[in-house]
Amino acid sequence: MASETTSVSLLGHALLALVHQQPMSGYDLRKLFAESHLQHFSSSPGSIYPALKRLEENRLISGVTEQTDTLRPRKVYSITPDGTRMLRRWLEADVTREDVVNNTKELTLRFAFMGHLLDDEATVRFLDGVIGELAPYVDELDEFVRRGTSDLPLHGQLAVESGVESYRSFLQWARKARRRFRARMKTT
């Protein structure tokens, strides 16, 4: 059984979520990473296969070797009950200020995988968490800009504006997503 303190990387969580959707081989996963929105992860064997090995050693996934009578046997991974619990904990984790300031890509990844394991109410709770942490941060950034960035060179001023706009955009998206999920919950 996997330890409660088992540490899983962001890549490991992505792998858990993918094999939760359907059993896959390492090659299938590498191909998916190379050809999809998951491209920011390395699709190299040097990152995927060691991550799969760690997940298997921690009993979060299990691999079954198929086509053993060929030159290239294929190991197909499936998520275990411990892996599903670990994945659920990651998806349901409270959103922190640290997450909204430094980990918006991880928040987006968590959101993308929620639909396969969590219901709409859990998704709305997640979006409420994003909004609850991000809205005050955007207000702080706006105040920083209002106080003035004139002491910064033009490049710095524009870089600050870019950052503020990206956070504002993420906040607008989260509010829109929450409205759509709430509307869907009312109709079901």
Image: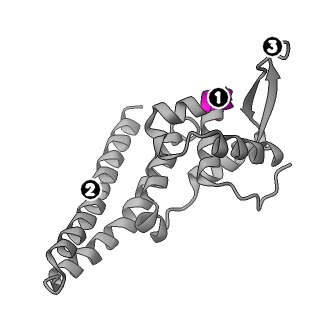
x then y, percent, for residue 54 = 76, 48
Residue at disc 3, secondary structure: loop
Q: Quadrant of the C terminus?
A: top left
Q: Earlier in the sequence, mark 2 or mark 1?
A: 1
Specify the label residue 70 is tagged with.
3
Residue 16 seen anywhere in this rendered image of the structure: no
Q: Which mark is residue 7?
A: none
User: Which label number is shown at residue 27?
Assistant: 1
Q: Which amino acid does the dot numbered 2 rest on?
A: Ser
The residues bearing labels 2 and 1 have C-alpha atoms spaced at a distance of 35 Å
Q: Amino acid at mark 3?
A: Thr
Query: Which SS type dominates the magenta stretch?
Result: helix
Q: Quadrant of residue 20?
A: top right
Q: CA distance from mark 2 to mark 3?
A: 51 Å
Characterize the local packing of mark 1: few (<14), some (14-19) or many (20 or more) Cα atoms within 10 angstroms: some
Q: Is residue 71 visible?
A: yes
Between the C-alphas of marks 3 and 1, the distance is 16 Å
Which residue bears the numbered disc 2?
A: 169
- The answer to which quarter of the image holds residue 65 is top right
The residue range painted magenta reads 20-29
Q: Position of residue 56 (x, y in %)?
A: 79, 42
Along the line of sight, which residue is nearer the eye, 146 or 182?
146
The local secondary structure at tag 1 comes to helix
